[in-house]
Amino acid sequence: MAIASVNPATGEVVEEFVEMGEAEIEARIGRADAVFRGHRGDSYDSRARFMRRVAELLDAERDEVAAVMTGEMGKTLVAARAEVAKCARLCRFYAERAAGFLADEPADAEAVGARRAYLRYEPLGPVLAVMPWNFPLWQAMRFAAPALMAGNTGLLKHASNVPRTALYMGELFTRAGFPEGAFQTLLIGSKSVERVLSDPRVVAATLTGSEGAGRSIAAIAGRELKKTVLELGGSDPFLVLPSADVEAAARTATTARTQNNGQSCIAAKRFIVHADVYDAFAEAFTANMAALRVGDPTAEDTDVGPLAQEQGLRDVTEQVEDARAKGARIRCGGERPAGPGWYYPPTVVADLTPDMRMYTEEVFGPVAGLYRVADLDEAIDLANATAFGLGANAWTTDEDEQARCIAELAAGAVFVNGMVTSHPELPFGGIKSSGYGRELAALGIREFCNAKTVWVGGG
């Protein structure tokens, strides 16, 4: 298949790459296995030293790496620089915390008739990471940093439209001091994933991507009895209730919907607003969305760049047109601008009904669905009326309403009076069709470890 870096702002091919053949795939899996066996007992101190060096390289090369990401998938340079900086912070976080997260955990030895009893965390081996293009550095790094600090090795199958970012990551860890082969990029297409995951030396897999891709990986891993962590799509609700600061909610909603040009699994997508504040929120939110500057992602004053892929542009356009044809109101946007590139404007769509695609599908672009509800019960019911369960936003200063939203919203994360985002310090992941398992924090580094029970008797 074609592996190419294509500039979404122009549609022009920047660079093409040859897909790795069987011999190269075999060599890289073998190298990952050999490095794991030879270095699984290395100290956390040595790994932490290398991981801090990764952070230093990211800091030093931030502008260069950001330009590569912008050129490959269209995020603004401002956002790309922030992504690189966030990755550096993640590396330092795990360099400092890994030893504590994976320290032996004592159990009640007396209760189990032992002299000593404890839980020990051990690495599993080579792990395959199948990663998406929307946060091409961050998504891969939030697997790589904890996996390597735990003593695993990584094989990265990145999205085929971000090969230059993938190759950068494939060299980064070796440059920082990790053994050659500890983390490697596989320039392969999706058809080769099954061959890699079926290899007995590859012990587990993690995927961030579509629901369909997650089902495929889970099916292969299930047949092979291998551990998986899946972070899939999202159609996050953004509830605005009468006690909310409506202007603050509208400002945050604009960022929440258009971050990364609207291409984020945890972007708020369905804006569910109580009737008492609907008109005020809708007016402010629509004005904010309409005021965003769409254009060249390399320009410092651009708010929204192009969508990453031409197919993505077609998908978003078709979803909006489906809603329009069935009676939805387009409050702003909704018309693709003339000229080259895969641009779509910030768009607000109201009066959505269940027969419209936007009502049930994830919209992966800067398009917001706006819903009016009568009360909190209706808001929670509508928020949960989706196959997805990644994140949820709730805006209310009423403590009882906050408690209900926290308890009743079906999601892997609930953010109250703030925008759903990921932090190294907090576990990240979803439920339902948004996947399973967790990344980040202590849970993330333990996902690809053997939690070994140890019982030691007397004598």
Image (tube, grey):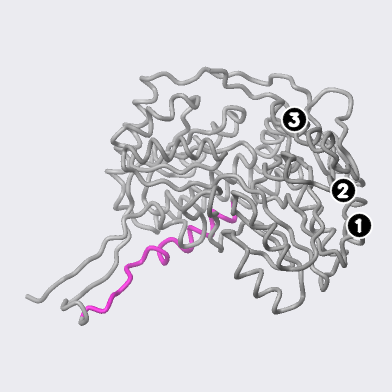
- Magenta-drawn segment: 88-109
Residue 170: horizontal and vertical position, in percent?
A: 49, 35
In the image, residue 395 above or below residue 185 = below
Precedes in sequence: disc 2 or disc 3: 2
Secondary structure of the residue carrying tag 3 is: helix
Of the image marks 3 and 1, the number of the one nearer the N terminus: 1
To which residue does mark 2 refer? 289
Indicate which disc residue 447 carries: none
The circle on residue 284 is 1
Q: Residue at x 54, y 57 (%)?
A: 92
Foreground residue among 418 and 404: 404
Earlier along the polypeptide chain: callout 2 or callout 1? 1
User: Could you tell whether 151 is left or right of 113 in the image?
Assistant: right
Q: Give me the residue at 49% from left, 50% from top.
A: 145
* Quadrant (top left, top right, bottom left, bottom right) of the C terminus: bottom left
Identify the residue shown where x is 59% and y is 34%.
Answer: 165
Contact (Cβ within 8 Å) of mark 2 with mark 3: no
Amino acid found under the numbered disc labelled 2: Met
Left or right for 80, reference 163:
right
Where is residue 447, by image quadrant?
bottom left
Q: Which residue is mark 3?
A: 313
Q: Secondary structure at mark 2?
A: helix
Residue type at mark 1? Ala
- Under mark 3, the amino acid is Leu
